[in-house]
Each structure stands twice: as C-alpha cells, then as structure tokens.
Amino acid sequence: MESFDIAIIGAGASGVLTAAHLHAAAPGKRAAILDAGARAARGLAYGTPYGAHLLNVPAARMSALAHDPDHFKRWLEARGMENAGPRFAPRTVYGEYLADVLGEACDAPSGLARVIGTSVGLARGEDGGWRVHLHDGRILAARAVVLALGNLAPADPLKSSGAESDNYLRDPWAPGAAQGLDPEAAVLIIGTGLTMVDLALALRVEGHRGPIHALSRRGLLPQAHVPHAPRALPAPPDPIPPRAMLRWVREQVAQAMGEGADWRTVIDGIRPHTRRIWGGWTVAQKGSFLRHARAFWDVHRHRTAPEVAAEVQSLLASGGLQVHAGRIHGLRDAGDGVEVRWSPRGEAGERTLQVARVINCTGPSSDYKAVDQPLVAHLRRAGWLTPDPLRLGVETDGDGRLLDTTGSPVAGLYTLGPLRRPTFWESTAIPEIREQSQALAARLAAEV
C-alpha cells in the first residue's frame, strides 16, 4: 500500500489547480493526484474537440496560479498568440495549458505522483488517516484527501416524464452528439444557456445546416462580453434580502450607465461582495433567489466571448437558431425522428415540434442527494458527505472541509469548486477555484 501526505481525487481543472498550488506551498509534501484515465486536466469544459468553443473569461484572468496572474498569458504568447491578455482563447488550448501545469508539478524533484485509477470509497485508517480504495482493488494511504470532482453529468429535465428515445441525448458531451444527422434536419436543444451555445456551434462545425430550436422556461440567452473594468462598488447593506439586493444592483447599474459606463462593470464589481451577500441569506431566501432570479443572474454574470456572441447573433438573424420560451410536456419517436409536445410560456395549449434529435443542454447537475457515482454514494452512506437542502452541492465549513450529517467537520476531508456552491454561490469559474485552491494548499501545508 503506497502512502502519501495528500491524495487529490480528480485530475480536472480543480484537481490540477490544487496540485499546482500545493506544489508551490508545500514542495516537500508527498502528494498524489488520482486520474480516472481520461485526458488529464481537460474535464468536460476543456476536453472539447472544437476550436470554436472559446473561454468565457479573457486570458489575463485565467492563470492557474494565484501567485502568478500572467502565467497563462505568457504561456499563450510563448506559443505565438500576440497581445493574449484581452483575448478569449479556445478551451481546448486551455486544456493543453492545464496539462502542462500538471506535467510541471509531476516532473518536479519532489514529484506529484499521478495515479491512474477511479476511487470508489474511503475508509479511516488506524492512524486516523484515510485509505483510498480504487476500482481495481488497490488501496492508497493518505493523511488528507481532497475531493476535486468538478461538475456532475447533466441532469435529465425529462426524467419524470419517462421520455425514452434513441434520438434523445441526455448528455450533450457524449461522443457524436453533434454528428450523424441529416444536414438539413431540425434539432431541438433543451436549454438556452452556455451549453446550448456550445452545441449550436458544434453542429455548424459538423456541417449541419438545418434549423436549431432552443427551448427553456424563459428563453434567455447569455449576454456578451465587452471590454470593461469592474466598477468599485460600495458595500451593500448587511444583511440585504434578495429583493433589496436586486434593487441595489439596479440602482448601481443606473448610476453607472448615467456616467457612461456599461452595466457589466457593475455585475463584475459585485464579485468581492457576493459571498457575504449569499452567506447572509436564509435557506428560504436563497431558494427564492434561485426560483425567481437565478436565470436572469446567470445570463448576465456568465457571458460569452465576443466572437461567440457574434456567431449566435448571425444564427438568430438567419433563422438558423430559433429560441423559444416554454415547457416540454413529453416526446415520442415518430418516423426517423422525435415528436415533441410543448407549450409556449403563458399559453395553456400544446404544440408539437418534429425534429431529428433532442439534446439536453440544461447544464450539469448539482444534486448530490441523487448522485449514484460509487465514491459519492459511499461517502453519503458513511455520513461524511451531506448534500445541501437546495441541491447546489455539499455542506462544507469555511476551510473547505466536508460537514458530516451532524454538522461537524470531517477531519482531513476537503473539497473545492462546484461542490462548494452552497457556501460561496460563485464557485465554478477558474478565478474562484484558483483562490480556493491556493487557500486550501496553504491549509494543507500547515496542517498535514
């Protein structure tokens, strides 16, 4: 049984950033990163084969290293991309960058060990540390474990309807999701957010020319980035309920636009205050925000690169992309395609839509109460992992330690990234994960 000071479970972006910061903060610690065997460092976001899929954040803000904010910018410029800072690099290129960051940590003298295998369970050792059980029977010992699991597979919005069809794809990242179609056939994408944009661009890259229908409850599309700098905002009242917070945001936007600034300067200027605002709300207030304002917040907060926004506008102008607000009631196989029953928002009657394929692009699930991954299910049964009541992630303390079913921190068991949305709300983008990984590395260096 091989022993380590720290075991990082997951080799996607969260795992790589944790490893890189741990290498910088504690080069003498013996650490392992467990890789399930896919292309390391890519994960769902950066494993795309399409160059048309761009980062949603400029390169200047995408460094993997909190102590070296220009690291990614220099990496790009060394590879021929001039003036890389304000540009939106292809996501596949960012995956190569993360792979390089991981490689440097593995090649260093103190050596991060990369272990190929899938963790299926944890157990306490007699020394109070952890035993990490792998799918092939191997066991690793570690004094502390970091769950860097990234995003879950997409939730199925039609699960309750019992929808079954070979032409309904629940996972937009499944191989061939944008391939194998009659070029002129109609396609329905469920969801109108960033994942929908990805699939629409992928379809066009694959030569698809038919109409793309995109449907969501509100029919909202992500906004575009424009050059700007975050606005320095005064701290909002503390506490500030959701309705008052939205009024405060509107007031700040009105003031900014009255001074000739863009509304985006305000949305990005809220970032330093987000955790305090979110943390001051009750569970009921958070639930209200999620039901009534989340969709509007997401399309303004999580924006697309200007080049991607231009492609979307071109598709809309040509009719190649048609956006609908409404609800799907069911679908059934019909000939070589799918007949979809749906109703537009605000209408009682049903309509039908005939398409060749339906693709679920509603985004990753976050309901850890329902996750059936072996490791997550094991931790849940053991009482070491507690899903939050709003199904955003898992319960953690301020340092990223998981809370057990009694609300007590689980010694030596940490997480970061999407799993920490109940604590931070903003916990999925590289800038947030980078900050979390740096803080976690410093804590592990001191405690382990």
Image (tube, grey):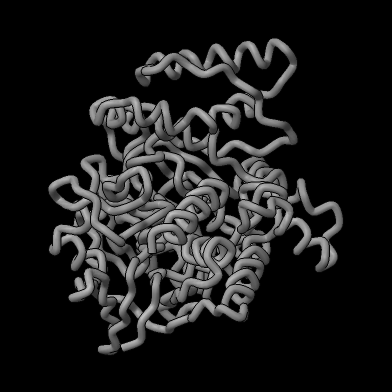
* Residue 157 seen in the figure: no
Asked whether 283 or 157 is in front, the reply is 283
Q: Give the residue at x 52% y 65%.
A: 26
Q: Quadrant of residue 283?
A: top left
- Residue 303's spot in the image, x, y percent? 59, 41
* Residue 87 seen in the figure: yes
Asked whether 330 or 271 is in front, the reply is 271
Asked whether 89 or 320 is in front, the reply is 89
Instruction: Relative to 183, say whether 352 is above or below.
Output: above
Q: Taking 118 as reference, is 127 left or right?
A: left
- Residue 438's spot in the image, x, y percent? 52, 53
Asked whether 51 or 329 is in front, the reply is 51
- Residue 411's spot in the image, x, y percent? 26, 58
Instruction: Relative to 10, say whether 65 is above or below.
Output: above
Quadrant position of the C terminus in the picture: bottom left
Q: Give the residue at x 22% y 56%.
A: 385
Q: Give the residue at x 78% y 59%.
A: 74
Quadrant position of the N terminus in the picture: bottom left
Q: Quadrant of residue 284?
A: top left
- Residue 177's spot in the image, x, y percent? 47, 68
